[in-house]
Image (tube, rainbow, N blue to C red):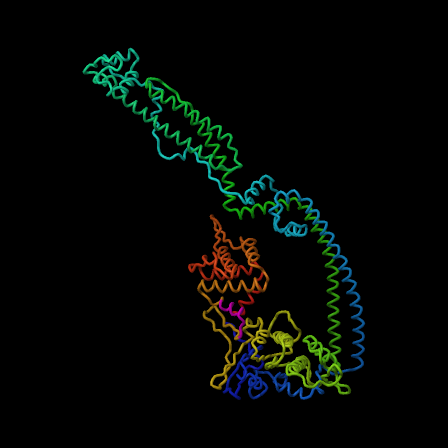
Amino acid sequence: MAEKMKGLIKKVVVNDATFQNESIEPTYINFFFGKNGSGKSTIAKAIDDPSALEWQTGVNADNYTILIYNQDFINKNFETYGDLKGVFTLSEENVETRKKIDETTAERDVVIEDGKKAAADRDTKKEELDPLLTNFQATCWDNTETVRKAFEKTQTGKKKKAQFSEAVLSGEHAAVHHETKDIQELYDVAYDPNAKSYPLFKKSKDVPGRYDLSGASLLSKSITSSSETDFAKFMKALNATDWVKNGHAAYVGHSDKKCPFCQQKLPDDFEKNIKECFDEQYQNDLLALDAFQTAYSSKMSQILTLLQDNLSDVFPKVDTKEYEKKLAQLESAITTNQRKIAGKVDSPAKEVTLKDTDTLIKEIDDLIDEINKQTQVNNDIVSTKHDKQLECLKMVWEEIAFILKDEVAAYKKSKKDIEVAIKTFDDKVKELLKKYKELEKKFSDLNSKVINTKMTVDSINAHLLDSGFEGFSLREKSGVKGVYEVIRENGTIAENLSEGERNFIAFLYFYHVVRGSLSELDTGKDKIVVIDDPVSSMDSSALFIVSALIREMLAVCRNNVSLKEPEFEGKYIKQIFILTHNAFFHREVTYNMVRHYRYVTFFKINKKNNISSVEPCIRESKAVSEDDKNYNPVQNSYSALWEEFDKLDAPIPLMNVIRRILEYYFLQLCGYDSEELCDEVLVKNKEKFAVQVEGGMPDYTKYNLAKSMLKYIKSSNSFNDGLHFVDESIDVDQYKEVFRMIFDVMNQRQHYDMMMNESE
């Protein structure tokens, strides 16, 4: 677990005013926050008291200068505005130094001229890029006119030459050739606002139920009675078996036991003789034939109905002419067969052969397979319309890339040749600039060997002007080396400055003291800086400049412990203490500092029952794998949201915090409207939220969760569908992961990391 890095002063013991032996263990950079009267000034004074300090072993306190900005500093240095002590660097001035300054100035002038020429050559070469791009844009536009117009809806946001060529050059789509008809087929459905799904045709096998058609074998068999009675032989001889059977069936029960033709009384054994004429096999065959007729009519009727119903809602691009022709042939064949079967039933002894319907039905089923393939393609596109639009768009842009691949290659080569030439000139410019900076540093070092009160005066006056203090300025006091005067515009010494003006000038003076020294003899010592409430009575512009200067001091102090490229040169500030009661100023100077746990510490000054105490703002680790962390005792509402986000472990309140962060940052700070934000995340980056599942469809849980988060912020006045997705069964870590992914796809990960570090 990381430990704090102790500063040169490793302990301050405060035993004055309302403090009772309060021990403070500072690091390199230390921030103290406390309300007025809590004891800040007492701590600042203690750091100036050698008896209150404990230094690192081996450190000689005489090698360091402790500089404290507080009310005592202001009073001591500003009793009169007519005599401000000078701020010096080094003071050794001689003829040799002046000669070197002149030589350096001349060399610098040559470098400046060479740099101007190299920059001009570079800029001239850069001017070749614009016409090259213009010609390329025109070529791209003209060569793809047919494709662009044919598939116009895939060109949204790319309908100008510049936008179009930029998309071509992005390399987002590979050069792949696609047949126009394939793209057209997909485009016509995917981008048709009226496109819909159509039912697939049913096939003959989809007819429900089971049918016994075994009686079909009786059609080619002559069904006759096998009885040997005299009456039966008589009927066979007359070939009247069917006639008698049908007549008996039609008139029995209505004849009053008389013959229906001659009206003579029938013999008493007539019914017995009739029954004997028709044996059991004959009766069974007739029953089987009747059953076949019923089953055949029922099945064929259902097949016809099913096949005809297929035509009730047909995909318009399907050609059904052949299907309808075959269906008519089938209907005709079935009608013929039903007529033949009826004839067989009427005359069982008659042999009949049915027309072939099985072949027709198979041909119709084969046609249905082809029709369903076309219909299914349409339905698949409609069911995943958005995805198919993306697929179509990809195909179109791959075709465009294929058409333009040679033009793109030629443009890139020409552009690269120009850029190589530009880089050659630019490298020369940079080399000369580097040499110029070296000469500037040499010039500065040489100048530092003379007393340079004027540079300090110019710097302070520049800061005064930047902050809006136009009524007075500083100048060197005539005849007195290293002394300044605060003068009005009319040349008189300034009097009756406001407290804010007085404090601001005092701080600018202090800032230059930190960078330089208070006397010609006090040179080369590193500093320990203490700043006690520097922004009292200052307006916002002065406060801003003071905050910026303090951040510079903090950066210089950080150079002692940070291995990164320094933001400001120098390591002359070895330890720094900032004390304030102003929350706004505190937030300004502590920006992005909370994450540097090892060498930065925040302290909160408390006062209760007239006893003051100092509390380090550190959150102790809760697990073996975690580290202790700083926290800032002063937070704005936005930072507080991030801290709440980091702590929450319940989905409902977490979603509310997520909404507020997304709404404030992306809508209010970044300037997106909700529709733009949804489009960037949910449309352009949808696949980044998909989790591929081996052997199955992608898992879009994260995408749906992101969609819920963004729809949540669409309207601040009403609830919407996004609320319904919040599900306590989903792991809170997944909520936080998706929230982070939104910042990733919006290229705002740096902000996410910064706020998470600060909230931690």
- Locate residue 229 relative to residue 623 in the image: left or right: left
How many numbered marks are there? 0
Q: Is residue 641 magenta?
A: yes
Location of residue 244 with respect to 169 vertically, above or below: above
Q: Quadrant of residue 309?
A: top left
Residue 604 coordinates in the image, percent (x, y): 52, 79
Residue ranking furthest to the left:
268
The secondary structure that dominates the magenta segment is helix
- Is residue 185 or residue 564 the one in the foreground? 185
Residue 400 coordinates in the image, percent (x, y): 64, 45
- Is residue 80 or residue 95 the one in the foreground? 80
Location of residue 470 with respect to 639 vertically, above or below: below
Residue 163 coordinates in the image, percent (x, y): 65, 52
Residue at 48% over, 32% down: 367
- Is residue 11 or residue 211 the one in the foreground? 211
- Locate residue 581 relative to residue 477 in the image: left or right: left
**Residue 525 in view (yes/no):** no
**Residue 700 in view (yes/no):** yes
Q: Quadrant of residue 251?
A: top left
Location of residue 356 with respect to 530 vertically, above or below: above
Q: Quadrant of residue 65?
A: bottom right
Residue 207 coordinates in the image, percent (x, y): 39, 34
Location of residue 239 with respect to 427 vertically, above or below: above
Residue at 78% over, 70% down: 108
The magenta segment is: 634-644
Q: Is residue 694 magenta?
A: no
